[in-house]
Image (cartoon, helix red, strand yellow):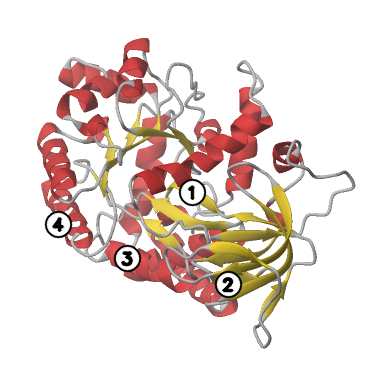
Amino acid sequence: MLYLRDASFVDWRTLKIRRGHLEAAPGPAGKVRFVSRIPRGEKALDCSGRLVTKSFVIAHHHLYSALACGMPGPARAPKNFPDMLKLVWWNLDRKLDRDMIRACAMAGGIAAAKAGATFIIDHHSSPNAVQGSLDVIADALDEIGLSHLLCVELSDRDGKAKSEAGLEETDDYLRKRQGLVGLHASFTVGDDLLYRAIAMAVGRNAGIHIHVAEAVDDQKDCVKKHGMRVIQRLARTGVLESPKTLLVHGLHLSAQERALFRSSRSWFVQNEESNQNNAVGAFDPKGLGDRLLLGTDGMHGDMIASTRAVYLAAQGRGGMSPLSAYRRLRRAHDYLSENKFSGDGENNLVILDYRPPTPVSTGNLAGHFLYGINASHVDSVVSGGKLIVKNKRMVLVDEDKVRQFTLKQTERLWRRL
């Protein structure tokens, strides 16, 4: 058992705060409960009144981009979003090998854990090193102590052999672990690949994880090739029928597409900072309902920052309350729970060393979350009832050794770029 002494525990659902000693049981379904005293001889983490609450979920990540910060620029400046993909991200993912993939997963996973996340839903791409790639990522995240839901980004952009390899890797992985069937986006996915991916998702009881209308080019291509818009194509092929399906971005949607999504069982993931970085548009939740999650799209692993970005961006588009922004962050727990994915139990906790000069209460905690709390306040993290971050340092892996490894792999990757 793990004990937390003198914790100010915040119920993530109600935001009610109660102070006392906590007992966190280990395991994927471990419970957390208050105890009147800590059993004699048991070690306990002294919280000294610090805020303790449920940790975070990154609902859409690209760990393969974890070594990109500071990398060499493309040969020329991209003219638009498709150009950005071709010159930057598709150039990078083609250069990855097994060691680089592990370095990305370790670096990105550690960054996420130290920002308070214990669950990552990742969308991976390494077309020239796809075989065994998901196991490499899963093993790295397991070492760190993070739970995960992984997929390979299936696409026709690199030819038939590469899409076949991606399908094989996906099927092999889903035989052993929970995961999703990944697709890049409609404009790089032909009908044959789409239908085979759907069949695999149904056969393996998994959902589809796909970028949707991130840029207007996705819609133009779909209309030209298929005579319909992206959400219409996905609806007609059955992608939206699964409550496990994740649609990512959704910036350029018609009223009809919004209605199709709202009547479906799938979920949308908003990635505000990435959209701003790529200048592709702004997410509008109008008409989409409340099956909306938050991700980082590979920008970083900090869900507090992502939530604040969503909140601030909304102020120029009709407004959003701090509580609404907080609730959207927490919807990821509902997605995982409703679909019976393991790894996001109540014994996933973040201890925040946050001592503001103003009172913290149930009524204003969402405001503190948006305007006061940030990743620097993450002191310790519990995943599955076990400490994985203590006093801002990783517990299960040696950060210094990992950094030496990631630096070496980064140098190799950048030379290839």
Using the numbered discs, state the Cα–Cα distance from disc 1 to disc 3 in whole angstroms.
24 Å
Question: Farthest top residue?
Answer: 255
Q: Which mark is residue 212?
A: none
Precedes in sequence: disc 3 or disc 2: 3
Q: How crowded is mark 2: few (under 14 residues within 10 Å), some or many (20 or more)?
A: some
Task: Label 3, secondary structure: give it.
Answer: loop
Quarter of the picture containing the N terminus is bottom right
Instruction: Name the residue that disc number 3 marks.
Output: 97
Cβ–Cβ under 8 Å for marks 2 and 4: no
Q: Residue 58 carries which label?
A: 1
Q: Can residue 394 be seen in this view?
A: no
Using the numbered discs, state the Cα–Cα distance from disc 3 to disc 4 in whole angstroms.
18 Å
Of circles 3 and 2, which is in front? 2
Using the numbered discs, state the Cα–Cα distance from disc 2 to disc 4 in whole angstroms.
35 Å
Precedes in sequence: disc 4 or disc 1: 1
Precedes in sequence: disc 1 or disc 3: 1
